[in-house]
Amino acid sequence: MIRLTVNGTAHELEVPSYRTLLDCLRYDLGLTGSKEGCGVGVCGACTVLLDGKMISSCIALAAFADSREVTTVEGLAQDERLHPVQQAFVDAGGFQCGICTPGQVVSAKALLDANPNPSDAEIREWMVGNLCRCTGYYKIIESIRVAAERSRA
Ligand code: FES
Ligand code: FES
């Protein structure tokens, strides 16, 4: 039995000890925004925030999130409004496929929470764990730059 808060909602559920946090989110809680790309902690498609810090939920056990707060991509928009990072991904063309984008957006939010004014080099370094197999990185970096600029305006 674990208790966790996901996107502000408290949940109590029974999960097998081997259940990953990603499977718990997707199959127990129906939050399918976080994706399974590689399943081994390499691609970043499953990135969520655990107590505000980004993790690969495919290699974290659900039990690890007991008594903690999880934020998924579904938890970013507020009051029917996209999160500024989501909006910037739409406006600047960073929003490409549905597999890598949720993780890209969650990682970008974590970056701007930690560093509201990142350089391009800092953006590239932070996002190194989020892979896009189509290599559409330029617009992803541009989207993060736009979100950062807007947050300072
Ligand atoms: Fe988790 Fe690739 S699915 S890092
Ligand atoms: Fe998602 Fe390339 S846009 S893998």
Image (cartoon, helix red, strand yellow):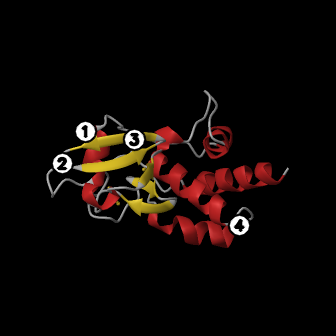
Q: CA distance from mark 1 to mark 2?
A: 9 Å
Q: CA distance from mark 1 to mark 3?
A: 13 Å
Q: Is residue 18 left or right of residue 108?
A: left
At numbered mark 2, what does the secondary structure look like: helix, strand or loop? loop
Q: Is mark 2 within 8 Å of ligand 1?
A: no
Q: Amino acid at mark 2?
A: Val
In which image quadrant can residue 64 be found? Answer: bottom left
Q: Earlier in the sequence, mark 3 or mark 4?
A: 3
Q: Nearer the viewer, mark 1 or mark 2?
A: 2
Q: Which numbered mark, 1 or 3, is in the foreground of this view?
A: 3
Q: Give me the disc on residue 28.
A: 1
Q: Residue at x 78, y 48 (%)?
A: 150
Q: CA distance from mark 3 to mark 2?
A: 15 Å
The residue closer to the viewer here, 44 or 109, is 109
Q: CA distance from mark 4 to mark 2?
A: 39 Å
Find residue 15 and name its label: 2
Disc 4 within 8 angstroms of ligand 2 (CB): no
> Which amino acid is tagged 1?
Asp
**Residue at 26% across, 58% down:** 63
- Do labels 3 and 2 touch, CB within 8 Å? no
Amino acid bearing label 3: Ala
